[in-house]
């Protein structure tokens, strides 16, 4: 995936940093991988269909065909399901990024975002000295 750390933990200080723009970037990567896997599965399915039934109709060929048919369906179905799940991981990362941004913005508002020195008694214990920083939505390219 992309370089950098989406979630970094510093156990000594007890902090955890979650960067929404990196979550969006990783989400796009998972969506792209899911799409590429789906295309590869389609190509595999087309190539195997183009081969036809080269194993013949004799006893060994019939035995192979009896095992191949169900296995083929399970393989293609499983790979299609995997491609869909990989894409859904991307959607989940986008949702997590949005929830993180919303929670950060809500917390900033709760701590006095928009309250400047003129709106309160001034800095003191627990006071917010100015407007809270706006949390960026997505800074990735």
Image (cartoon, grey):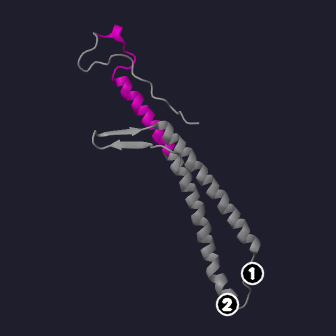
Instruction: Please tell me the numbered disc located at residue 60.
Output: 2
Give how far across and how far down residue 58 sits, in percent: 72, 91
Q: Which residues make up the magenta segment? A: 93-120
Q: Helix, strand, or loop for circle 1? A: loop
Give how far across and how far down residue 131 sits, in percent: 39, 18
Residue at image location 35% in from the left, 19% down from the top: 112
- Taken as a whole, is the magenta stretch helix, strand or loop? helix
- Residue 120 lies, with reference to residue 80, above or below; the image says above
Furthest toward the left, the residue is: 125
Left or right, residue 140 beside residue 107: right
Q: Circle 1 is placed at which residue position?
A: 54
Give how far across and how far down residue 3 sits, in percent: 51, 45
Instruction: Please tell me the numbered disc located at residue 26.
Output: none
Give how far across and how far down residue 24 sits, in percent: 52, 40
Furthest toward the top, the residue is: 118
The residues bearing labels 1 and 2 have C-alpha atoms spaced at a distance of 12 Å
Left or right, residue 116 beside residue 41: left
Looking at the figure, which quarter contains the C terminus? top right
- Residue 70 lies, with reference to residue 113, above or below; the image says below
Q: Helix, strand, or loop for circle 2? A: helix
Residue at image location 72% in from the left, 83% down from the top: 55
Residue 56 is one of the magenta-drawn residues: no
Of 134 and 106, nearer the camera is 134
Residue at image location 61% in from the left, 76% down from the top: 70
Of 112 and 73, nearer the camera is 112
Label 1 Cα crowd, 10 Å radius (few <14 / some 14-19 / many 20+): few
């Amino acid at each position: 995936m992309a370089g950098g750390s989406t979630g970094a933990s510093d156990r000594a200080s007890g902090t955890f940093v979650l960067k929404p723009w990196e979550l969006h970037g990783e989400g796009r990567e998972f969506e792209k991988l899911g799409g590429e896997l789906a295309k590869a599965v389609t190509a595999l399915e087309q190539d195997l269909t183009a081969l036809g039934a080269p194993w013949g109709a004799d006893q060994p060929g019939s035995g192979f065909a009896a095992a191949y048919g169900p296995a083929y369906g399970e393989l293609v179905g499983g790979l299609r399901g995997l491609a869909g799940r990989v894409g859904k991981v991307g959607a989940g990362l986008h949702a997590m990024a949005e929830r993180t941004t919303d929670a950060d913005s809500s917390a900033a508002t709760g701590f006095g975002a928009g309250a400047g020195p003129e709106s309160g008694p001034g800095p003191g214990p627990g006071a917010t000295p100015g407007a809270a920083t706006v949390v960026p939505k997505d800074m990735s390219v």
